[in-house]
Amino acid sequence: MPRPKGLPKTGGKKKGSKNKRTLEIEFRSAAKGIMPLDYMIQVMRDGKADPVRRDDMAKAAAPYLHARRAPEDKQGKTVPPMVYVTPNLESDD
């Protein structure tokens, strides 16, 4: 039976808690040193590092920190994604 609307959730996993896999990944990475993304950010912010290397680290870290913009048409409106539907080849029609 579903919980009535407006009543707080009781029991179960707390919101935002980490699962076993996430905890294991954090434990292993802590034992080895810093995470790759943390390293890339550290190099990117280092003023003494080679500028080309800093640029490369910024390019590598960007997809993990910033979302891509949605495609737009000439008027600047967001274009919905295209969905391709293929016919069922196993039907006996």
Image (spheres, rainbow, N blue to C red):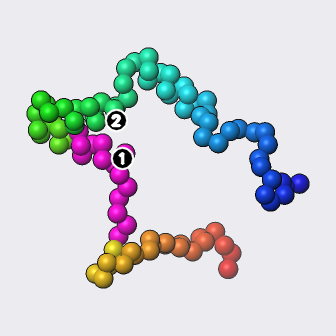
Above or below, 12 relative to 90: above
The reply, left or right, for residue 65 in relation to residue 46 is right
Please identify the dominant SS of the magenta region. Answer: helix
Is label 2 in a helix, a strand or a loop? helix
Badge number at residue 87: none
> Residue 26, position in %: x, y?
49, 26
Q: What residue does disc 1 label?
A: 65
* Chain part drawn in magenta: 57-71
The amino acid type found where label 1 is placed reads: Leu
Q: What residue does disc 2 label?
A: 37
Residue drawn at x 12%, y 29% is: 48
Which residue of the protein is positioned furthest toward the top in this rendering? 31
* Residues under numbered marks 2 and 1 in contact, where contact means CB atoms less than 8 Å apart: yes
Going from N to C along the chain, the mark reached first, 2 or 1, is: 2
The reply, left or right, for residue 58 in relation to residue 71 is left
Picture quadrant where residue 79 is located: bottom left
The amino acid type found where label 2 is placed reads: Leu
> Residue 82, position in %: x, y?
45, 73
